Amino acid sequence: MFKIIVDRECGCFKRSNLQSSTEIASKDEALMKSLEMVNHMNDEFCGKHKFKVEEADNTFIIKMQ
């Protein structure tokens, strides 16, 4: 299993319907989902923060830049 974790939740994230932790069976699917989340967060949130994905073992971590 591969995890997607949001490192720090800003106010926009807390108000969204996104989950801060998710497990997905496939590495490719987890990577694609984490990139989709980051793109959504960067495009739809207030713009105060920018987000990026980092990979660590079996985890994709969404962090503020």
Image: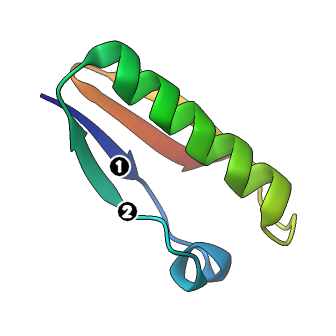
Q: Residue at x 58, y 72 (%)?
A: 13
Q: Residue furthest top?
A: 28
Q: Where's the C terminus, which quadrant?
A: top right
State the separation of the CA atoms marked 2 and 1: 6 Å
Residue 17 numbered tag = none
How far across and down, in percent of the image, does residue 54 sit?
49, 28
In this rendering, position of residue 19 left or right of residue 43: left
Q: Tell me how the rendering is colored.
A: rainbow
- Label 2 SS: loop
Crowding near pointer 2: few (<14 within 10 Å), some, many (20+)?
some
Which residue is tagged 1?
5
Residue 26 versus residue 40 in the image, above or below: above
Query: Mark 1 and mark 2 in contact (Cβ < 8 Å)?
Result: yes
Residue 19 versus residue 34 in the image, above or below: below
Q: Nearer the viewer, residue 54 or 15?
A: 15
How far across and down, in percent of the image, does residue 19 sit?
38, 64
Residue 60 versus residue 55 in the image, above or below: below
Residue type at tag 1 = Ile
Q: Residue at x 84, y 67 (%)?
A: 48
How far across and down, in percent of the image, does residue 26 sit?
24, 19
Q: Residue at x 49, y 37 (%)?
A: 34
Residue 20 numbered tag = 2
Q: Where's the N terminus, which quadrant?
A: top left
How far across and down, in percent of the image, does residue 31 sit?
44, 24
Residue type at tag 2 = Ser
In this rendering, position of residue 28 left or right of residue 42: left
- Label 1 SS: strand
In this rendering, position of residue 65 left or right of residue 33: right
